Image: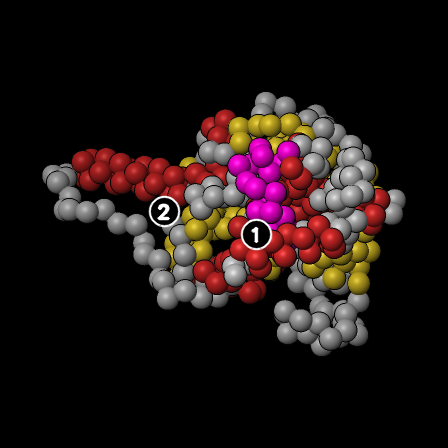
Amino acid sequence: MAEWQTRQLAEIFQKQGLQAAPSQVWQGIRLVPLIDPQPVADLRLFRHKTKAELGIVSVEDDLAYYAYLPHSYILNWTPAGDPEALSGTQMQKQGGVKDAGKRDGKRWKAAPVMQFERMAKKLDAQHLRFLPQHLGIEGYLHQFFNAPGIDWRDTYRRSAISEGLLPREACVLSGYALEGLETALRIFEMHPGQVGLLVFVADALAMICLYPHPSDYAFLHRSLIGDLFAELFWYYSRLDYAVQPLKSEGKSQAQNWQELKAELQALRGGIAQFQTWMAAGLLEMPIETQAVQDLGPYQLLRFVSQLAPNQTQEGHMGELILSQSGKCVYFKSCRLSESQIQTAWLLQNLEKQLWHLGNTAQTLNLSYDQLVLKLLKCDLGRLLKPQIIDQVLKREREKQK
């Protein structure tokens, strides 16, 4: 498996030439269109709707990934770089599967299960099928939820040493769970040349999506409701908070059409700059990337942003496709919750300190007991032997007497 590498996402997006159009708002949802004046023509993407929304993916010989998988993406590219209109790019409405069971969009009483061989699989020389966002989620689980590298048998359970954290879990919700998102996508007015979208919930960045070509985006726009979002946006979407459109202050000083046009362009530029600043929690952070598949002149990678558990830094995961020149032609992110960031950060530091609790606590400026309590709070107590936990909890009770 390829090594993880650090990249600066800001440098990648600076090569894009992307323009952020004025946002459109509905209740607590803000959607910011992304426009590419020069989209690529030799890479196209379309949606392949699965026959069942529950899926099992084989990621390793003895490891399977279970998830909500409403669709996969199919990529097509031309080795010579020639433009291509891909047959089948247009989304076709399909009927439901017989005996799919009763469901209300959130819960299944009974449902078929789809099996996938891998997260990303080449279908032939010019086609690749991959599972959007799940590449990033599986990368997050694979990078952080590993078995201790040293057999500290006085500290860790035998099962943790031999198997690591199983099952590895990440809780995310589909867009159907977010209040107002389905309506916001339905009434959204698309722009000419639009290839992507910034999705904000209560003005917090929830997702960035970017597709290779405006035609791809036009056909995939409504399918964003099936994408994945952090659990915190379920709460954010239900806040008594209606986002406001961005407006200029003061009156126009234009004396003629030329001056009015210049003022309008300056206003749009200011709005675009501000909306990009709103996404700085992802765009200006370093990310760790891992190559998944070469696609002729392109490369598919998954990423996890660098983690630090504080109230100002965000955590995101997802996947992207880069051209040989470094241009990002596909990007889709999913935000991590605070608890997911904290969990991954603790596991990352344990691994750096060779899973020695005392050394890890010292590095993090914590006491031994404080570190154990943090592990318990993040549901990582299943790593530790029961006597370790009992001793720490006993000392905590004695402090409170």
Q: For this view, does 255 lie left or right of residue 48? A: left
The verdict on residue 4 being magenta is: no
Q: Tag 2 or tag 1, which sits nearer the N-term?
A: 2
Q: Residue furthest right?
A: 61
Give residue 138's position: percent from left, percent from top. 70, 46
Part of the protein shown in magenta: 359-376
Tell me the residue at 71%/37% (across/down).
355
Residue closer to the observer: 8 or 298: 8
Q: How is the image coloured?
A: secondary structure
- Per the image, label 1 sits on a secondary structure element best described as helix
Three-letter code for the amino acid on which mark 2 is drawn: Pro
Q: Quadrant of the N terminus?
A: top right
Residue most extreme to the top: 325
- Can you identify the residue that label 2 sits on? 22
Image coordinates of residue 110 in percent, x first then y, are 77, 73
Instruction: Tell me the residue that label 1 is attached to.
Output: 339
Residue contact between numbered discs 1 and 2, judged by CB atoms under 8 Å? no
Name the residue type under label 1: Ser
Which label sits on residue 165? none
Quarter of the image where one finds residue 320: top right
Graded by Cα atoms within 10 Å as few (under 14), some (14 to 19) or many (20 or more), the crowding at tag 1 reads: few
* Residue 91 in the image: above or below residue 177: above
Q: Nearer the viewer, residue 217 or 113?
A: 113
